[in-house]
Image (cartoon, helix red, strand yellow):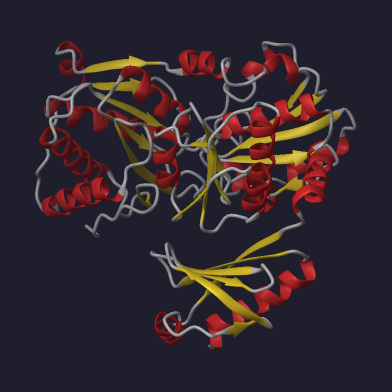
């Protein structure tokens, strides 16, 4: 067995290679031992997305937990990640185990553990689970009992958390306003958003056009990520129907969002986070700070400064933003990878909530997303953002590891004013542009992020970043 390693959102692996029943049981036993060692009570919510064998993996996990004396609340059907987080908090459970690989291709699956506070587990927690799991490899170290015995013993209960979650959304979204938008296109991308992204709109008589609303473990041949390059059918639908004023989409496990404007333009998640910050503070009058990951647009910073709102910059990984949500410190927190949540909601990415908030914003403001973005630029300035993945040869990878510790004083024709190393290496330039080098932990790839006030200047920054990564 290869070593179990938890990344920013849990342990992921390729089905039939390292993600197999044996390893799932080992990781579940490690989670059970972690919970029992900490005296955690309240049971564990178990969920899964629409990937191959998700329900089977979930049942095996419940068998192991039951043998460890831990009750499982097993979801009856595939369930969005934010709904599992909500159910953990609602039940005051000890935590949650979610079988998902989020937006990764269909050959992957994964285990995501969330502790009792509902957000993604912090590093100290995942490190303990990793250690316990890796100490068990190579031997039969887990215990399990049958599902029938677990039910008879009161250690297994099947649940459907949808009703409670949707009822809670009623308190956080103005659905009456959304009806004024006009037609809305809805795309759950064959994932867990089915029955969550469409049902609240249908029940209120909103005119919707739904596609990709059946379960498909292959996700239509694309990774289940609502990014522009993976949703051509959805963009085409919005463009082809003049009645559609907005398109909303979620990823495979419902924690990421994708927004298509009424003219078919895809709106980058960076800009949605900034727009919703402005909306929540200016229109909703919600008080507090804002958090963004180190890789997320400084348009968020500009909006925060405009409204006099405190800004928190975090490492990549929603667990850090989720912690601030759970502490009530921020109005909204988000990542450029299309994850956000708001004050008073779950400390976990929620693509369903994000979609509905955008629809509410468009309805109440009476403008398209593009029009709202242009109005925001007039107030705080324009920001253009880009991300690229650069694959490294072994020689360049070794050289790059040394290079980032010996940075230039000038790059892309501007002075380096500040270096931020909370996650990767971020260079703030004298003209307000920035670039971030962030090495992948699992493959020979450097993620290069950049931002400037214009597309032309951004290309200069990205070109200089690529040159630095590859040649120094």
**Front one among 207 and 171:** 171
| Residue 12 in the image: above or below residue 82 | below
Residue at position x 43%, y 67% from top? 421
Q: Position of residue 328 (x, y in %)?
A: 44, 32
**Front one among 406 and 237:** 406
Q: Quadrant of residue 466?
A: bottom right
Q: Position of residue 26 (x, y in %)?
A: 19, 44
- The answer, for residue 183, to whether it is visible in the render is yes
Residue at position x 69%, y 48% from top? 271
Q: Position of residue 28 (x, y in %)?
A: 22, 38
Q: Quadrant of residue 211?
A: top right
**Front one among 316 and 301:** 301
- The answer, for residue 211, to whether it is visible in the render is no
Residue at position x 77%, y 66% from top? 455
| Residue 77 in the image: above or below residue 125 | above
**Front one among 433 and 76:** 433
Q: Quadrant of residue 114?
A: top left
| Side (left or right) of 379 relative to 435 | right
| Side (left or right) of 101 relative to 148 | right
Q: Position of residue 254 (x, y in %)?
A: 53, 34
| Residue 430 in the image: above or below residue 307 | below
């Amino acid at each position: 067995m290869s070593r179990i390693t938890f990344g920013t959102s849990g342990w992921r692996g390729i089905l039939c290679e390292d993600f197999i029943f044996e390893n799932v049981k080992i990781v579940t036993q490690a989670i059970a031992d972690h919970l029992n060692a900490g005296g955690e009570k309240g049971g564990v919510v178990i969920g899964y997305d629409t990937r191959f064998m998700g329900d089977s993996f979930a049942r095996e996990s419940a068998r192991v937990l039951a043998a460890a004396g831990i009750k499982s609340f097993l979801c009856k059907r595939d369930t969005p990640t934010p709904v599992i987080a909500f159910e953990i908090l609602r039940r005051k459970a000890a935590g949650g185990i979610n079988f998902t690989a989020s937006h990764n291709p269909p050959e992957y699956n994964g285990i995501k553990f969330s502790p009792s506070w509902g957000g993604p587990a912090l590093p100290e927690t995942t490190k303990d689970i990793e250690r316990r799991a890796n100490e068990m490899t190579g031997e039969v170290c887990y215990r399990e009992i049958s599902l029938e015995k677990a039910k008879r013993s009161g250690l297994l209960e099947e649940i459907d958390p949808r009703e409670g979650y949707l009822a809670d959304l009623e308190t956080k979204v103005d659905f009456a306003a959304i009806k004024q938008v006009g037609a809305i296109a809805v795309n759950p991308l064959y994932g867990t958003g089915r029955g969550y992204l469409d049902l609240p709109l249908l029940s209120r008589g909103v005119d919707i056009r739904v596609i990709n609303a059946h379960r498909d473990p292959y996700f239509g041949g694309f990774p289940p990520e609502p990014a522009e390059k993976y949703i051509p059918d959805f963009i085409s639908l919005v463009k082809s129907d003049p009645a559609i004023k907005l398109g909303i989409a979620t990823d495979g496990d419902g924690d990421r969002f994708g927004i298509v404007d009424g003219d078919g333009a895809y709106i980058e998640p960076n800009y949605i986070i900034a727009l919703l910050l402005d909306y929540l503070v200016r229109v909703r009058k919600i008080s507090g700070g804002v958090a963004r990951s180190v890789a997320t647009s400084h348009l968020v910073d500009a909006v925060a400064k405009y409204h006099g709102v405190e800004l928190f910059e975090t490492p990549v990984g929603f667990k850090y933003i989720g912690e601030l949500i759970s502490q009530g410190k921020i109005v909204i927190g988000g990542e450029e990878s299309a994850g956000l949540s708001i004050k008073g909601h779950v400390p976990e990415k929620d693509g369903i909530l994000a979609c509905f908030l955008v629809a509410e914003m468009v309805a109440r403001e009476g403008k398209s997303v593009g029009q709202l973005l242009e109005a925001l630029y007039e107030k705080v300035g324009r920001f253009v953002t880009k991300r690229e993945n650069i694959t490294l040869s072994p020689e360049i990878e070794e050289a790059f590891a040394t290079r980032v510790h010996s940075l230039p004083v000038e790059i892309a024709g501007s002075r380096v004013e500040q270096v931020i190393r909370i996650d990767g290496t971020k260079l703030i330039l004298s003209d307000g542009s920035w670039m971030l080098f962030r090495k992948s932990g699992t493959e020979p790839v450097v993620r290069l992020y950049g931002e400037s006030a214009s597309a032309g200047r951004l290309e200069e920054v990205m070109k200089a970043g690529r040159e630095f990564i590859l040649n120094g």
